[in-house]
Image (cartoon, helix red, strand yellow):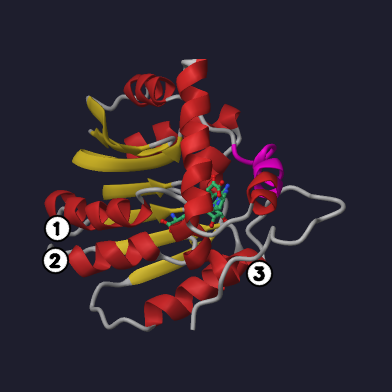
Amino acid sequence: MQSKDHIFAAPIAQLGDFCFDQNVAEVFPDMIKRSVPGYSNIISAIGMMTTRFAQPDSQLYDLGCSLGAATQEMRRNLTQPGCRIIAVDNSAAMLERAASHLAAFKSDVPVTLTEADLCDIEIDNASVVVLNFTLQFIDPDKREALLSKIYRGLKPGGVLILSEKFISADETVNELLIDLHHDFKRANGYSELEISQKRTALENVMRPDTPELHKTRLKRVGFQHVDLWFQCFNFGSMVAIK
Ligand SMILES: Nc1ncnc2c1ncn2[C@@H]1O[C@H](C[S@+](CC[C@H]([NH3+])C(=O)[O-])CC(=O)[O-])[C@@H](O)[C@H]1O
Ligand SMILES: O=C(O)C(=O)Cc1ccccc1
C-alpha cells in the first residue's frame, strides 16, 4: 500500500523549510505524481534515452535519485553489457527506501546507492547522467561547477537529461504557468491550504531558473547540443549531448 501525501493538509503554525525527511520519503511517490505535471512521461523517456545513449562498459548516474524511479527505468531499459548505475542522494531516509524499492525488481544490472552531496562526488566514464528535478535544490552558485563536473565525466556522445521546474522570463506567462500548475494540483486533490503552505515551505530551498539560463549554462560548460525536449506548464526536461 502506498501512503498518500497529507504533509501540508493541516495548518502549520511555524512553517519551516521543506526537507526530504522520513515523512516526505514515506509519501514521495504519491507527492511527486500529484505535484509534477509530466513526471511519468519523463521517467519513461529516461528509459528510452538510456537504450539509445548507454555505451558498453560505462557508468550511468541518477543524481538526486530519491526512491530510485529513474534508476529503475534505466536498469529496465539497459541493453548494453558491462554497465553499472550509480544512484546518489543526500537524504538517508530516501536512500533507505530506494534500496527496498529497487530490491523488489529482479535485474542483472549492478546499482550502487551512495549517500552524498552531489557537489562532492566524482563522475567518470559516464554515458548517461540524470538530474531529474534535483538541480533546482542545489545552491545556485554551485550549479555551474556541478554541470561542468558532469560534462568532464561524460564520454563523447554521452547525454545529460536535466528535468526542472522553470520560471519564465515573461512575468505574465510566468504567472499563468504557476496558476496552471496550481490548477493541476487542485485537480489532483490538493487543497488551497496544502498548495499555499507547500509553496511557502519551498521558497527558500527550491530556486528555479529560466530555460534560457539552463541552456546558456549547459553550452558554457561545453555541451555541443542542448535543447528542451518536454515541457508541461512550468515543469520540463532538457537534453544535453557531449
Ligand atoms: N545537494 C544534494 N545532494 C544530493 N541529493 C540532493 C541534494 N539536494 C537535494 N537532493 C535530493 O534531490 C532529490 C530531489 S527529488 C528528485 C526526484 C527523483 N530524481 C525522481 O526522479 O523520482 C525532486 C523533487 O522532490 O521535486 C531529493 O531526494 C533530495 O534529497
Ligand atoms: O509540489 C510542488 O509545488 C512542486 O513544485 C514540486 C515538488 C514535488 C515534490 C517535492 C518538492 C517539490
Q: Which residue is mark 2?
A: 81
Q: Are marks 2 and 1 in contact (CB under 8 Å)?
A: yes
The x and y percentages for residue 216 are: 37, 19
Crowding near the residue tagged with mark 2, few <14, some 14–19, many ≥20 C-alpha atoms within 10 Å: few
Q: CA distance from mark 2 to mark 3?
A: 36 Å
In this picture, residue 94 sits left or right of residue 74: right
Secondary structure at badge 3 equals helix
Secondary structure at badge 2 equals loop
Q: For this rendering, which residue is in front, 46 or 33?
A: 33
In this picture, residue 22 sits left or right of residue 50: right
The x and y percentages for residue 212 are: 39, 20
Q: Amino acid at mark 1?
A: Pro
Q: Which residue is mark 1?
A: 56
The majority secondary structure of the magenta stretch comes to helix
Q: Are marks 2 and 3 in contact (CB under 8 Å)?
A: no
- Residue 236 drawn in magenta: no
Q: Which residue is mark 3?
A: 22
- Residue 198 drawn in magenta: yes
Q: CA distance from mark 1 to mark 3?
A: 36 Å
Q: Start and end of the magenta stretch?
A: 197-206
- Mark nearest the camera among 2 and 3 is 3
Crowding near the residue tagged with mark 1, few <14, some 14–19, many ≥20 C-alpha atoms within 10 Å: some
